[in-house]
Image (tube, grey):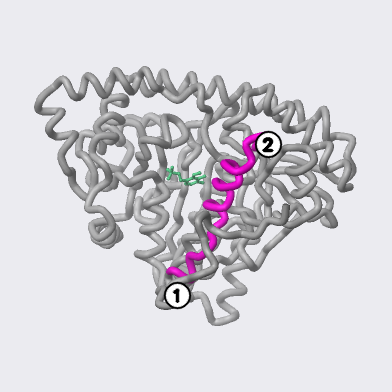
Amino acid sequence: MSVTLKSPGAGEVQFAGLSQRSRWAADQAISFLMQQGVENPGVISLAAGLVDESSLPADLLRETAAELLQEPAMARSALQYGTTQGRLDLRNQLVGYLAEQEGVPREELGVDSTRLVVTTGSQQLLSILCETLLDPGDICIVGAPTYFVFLGCLAGVGAEAVSVPLDANGMQPERLEAALTRLQSEGRLERVKLIYVVSEFDNPSGASLSAERRRAVLDIAEKWSIHQPLLVLEDAAYRDLRYAGTPRPSLLFEDKSRERVIYTQTFSKSLSPGLRVGFGVLPRSLQKAVLDRKGNEDFGSANFPQAIVARLLRNGTFRGHVERVRGAYREKLSAMLSAAERHFSDLPGVAWGRPQGGLYVWMSLPETIDTGFDSPLFQTAVKEFGVMYVPGELCFAPDARATNHMRLSFGVQTPEGIAAGMERLAGAVAKTL
Ligand SMILES: Cc1ncc(COP(=O)(O)O)c(C=O)c1O
């Protein structure tokens, strides 16, 4: 099986009049990966970033939807169009939810419901922000590695991603400073608009930004706001999925001005991606532009799922649910880490992260081993051993491409499936080594 990166349904014939933006957005890895999962049903997928099927809250959502629909006024409002910014009852609940995560009373959060926007998953906000902030040739600083769908969003608007290496504590501030110094010496500082950080249990590296580094990143963003404000985009998609360690304040909360950070979070991982409810906290200076753009896209995310999330937050059932979800993932993470210990510790030059949350373990192989779709390892893993992973190279911007890593997801498989998948993968790696 030889694999080339094409979007599903992509034919040989292409409409000749495609826009530049369509060409920039062509052949994104995410669509290809989703397709691979569907086309290879016998394979244990450690690739898919889907969530644990058994903890999807069917009963809870059936009851909540029924309750909503039984109340005539609520039913009418939930089934009607809403506003571009999102339901006020949900935004009010989200303020309380954020305050709880920061460990402060609501009044001390420094953010009210007017600052929030509800989006169709956090992905929509990531995409809208790229459209709103970045012209072709503008620069966004990203981690190496980083969330590959965001790299697609940057490419899709013709922006450039400049990489800064991560370690177990997230983006390295000295390397960030060095990148900005270099961009300044190249006369390109005025093109730098954004620093993108996945602050908790990063996809793919699993790393979380340490408390000191959160402050350092904010200080650096402030210091380098020479030509225009350099904003920090904090993607906290996995914040609810902590299985060990102590929660930390977000960069949003660390930024006392509340104007430097754009914050995004989602209920896709903690509740259900089928509802696709995400939200953002925006600097005041960006609110109008983001809502104008969202107005063009959908003039408001679907109202019904928003009403459901608002109710689950209000009656406290979300909290109980997320506790159960954490329990399931804690067990899966532990299954993956002990299987890694069992099957990989004797393999020379193989190393992996030990995240405290999220859905991913990042594994590095010796630099001579290529993990890409067309590599002998990927082919052997899928065809001979029946296991699939995400090639790490997808998670690097072109300026930092490394080809010897794998992203392993523990979200979908059962603990037994994870153990079997890791054993198979170790077989494929040992064979390739
Ligand atoms: C880091 C990160 N951000 C954002 C998202 C988008 O999720 P959603 O649009 O479902 O909220 C994902 C999904 O995998 C992710 O991994």
- Between 79 and 355, which is closer to the camera in this rendering? 79
The magenta span reads 22-45
Q: Secondary structure at mark 1?
A: loop
Q: Position of residue 161 (x, y in %)?
A: 55, 66
Asked if residue 29 lies in the magenta stretch, the reply is yes
In this picture, residue 315 sits left or right of residue 261: left
Q: Kindly indicate the quadrant of the structure image that contains residue 69.
A: top left
Q: Position of residue 286 (x, y in %)?
A: 30, 59
Task: Please determine whether, in this image, residue 415 is positioned above or below residue 79.
Answer: above
Residue type marked 2 = Val
The residue carrying mark 2 is 43
Q: Is residue 228 visible?
A: yes
Task: Please determine whether, in this image, residue 212 is positioned above or below residue 136.
Answer: above
**Mark 1 within 8 Å of ligand 1, using the beta carbon:** no
In this picture, residue 375 sits left or right of residue 15: right
Query: Which mark is first along the chain, 1 or 2?
Result: 2
Which labelled disc corresponds to residue 418?
none
Q: Position of residue 43 (x, y in %)?
A: 68, 36
Contact (Cβ within 8 Å) of mark 2 with mark 1 = no
Q: Is residue 207 visible?
A: no
Asked if residue 23 lies in the magenta stretch, the reply is yes
The residue carrying mark 1 is 136
Please state which of the two labelled residues, at mark 2 or mark 1, is closer to the viewer.
2
- Between 337 and 69, which is closer to the camera in this rendering? 69
Task: Please determine whether, in this image, residue 42 is positioned above or below residue 312.
Answer: below
Of all residues, the one furthest to the left in this rendering is 73
